[in-house]
Amino acid sequence: MATSKKSKLSAKTNAKRNTVKGRAQMPASDFGLPAQKKYRIDDAAHARDALGRVAQSGTPAQQAQVRRRVKAKYPSIGQAGKSANRKSI
């Protein structure tokens, strides 16, 4: 069974960031699309989620921008074969 890494943020801090006010206070660098403050990438778990969500509903340009920003912040995310938590089929 694969285990996931926990967020470095405490549950209380993360809950505060999930409010409208909390999101507004977060720096733009914590988002995949900083101008729109969309797709949080402030920790590895949110970065993985951002990649999945932008793949579902983002334009090709948005997808490319989010992938670039996640890769710059978390180089190990998205590299096939590099994750110890993935199983080969």
Image (spheres, helix red, strand yellow):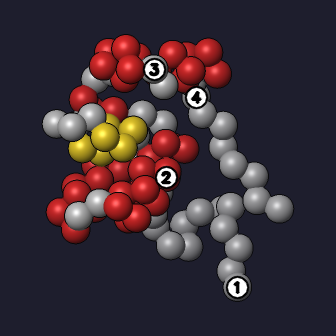
Comparing 77 with 27, the one in front is 27
Contact, mark 2 vs mark 3 (Cβ under 8 Å): no
What residue do we see at 48% from left, 25% from top? 18
Question: Is 23 rendered above or below residue 53?
Answer: above
What residue would you read off at disc 4? 8
Amino acid, disc 2: Arg
User: Residue 25 at x, y = what percent?
Assistant: 32, 15
Which label number is shown at residue 63? none
* Furthest-bottom residue in this view: 89
Q: Nearer the viewer, mark 2 or mark 3?
A: 3
The answer to whether residue 55 is seen in the rendering is: yes
What residue would you read off at disc 2? 48
Label located before the other in sequence (3 or 4): 4
Amino acid, disc 1: Ile
Label located before the other in sequence (2 or 3): 3
Real-space Cα separation, disc 2 to disc 4, in angstroms: 14 Å
* Furthest-right residue in this view: 1
Real-space Cα separation, disc 1 to disc 2, in angstroms: 21 Å
Is residue 81 toward the left or the right of residue 63 in the image? right
Label located before the other in sequence (4 or 1): 4
The mark tally for this picture is 4
SS at mark 2 in the image: helix
Contact, mark 1 vs mark 2 (Cβ under 8 Å): no
User: Residue 60 at x, y = what percent?
Assistant: 22, 68
Amino acid, disc 3: Thr
Q: Nearer the viewer, mark 2 or mark 4?
A: 2
Question: Is 84 rendered above or below residue 18?
Answer: below
What residue would you read off at disc 1? 89
Real-space Cα separation, disc 3 to disc 1, in angstroms: 39 Å
Amino acid, disc 4: Lys
Is residue 30 toward the left or the right of residue 18 in the image? left
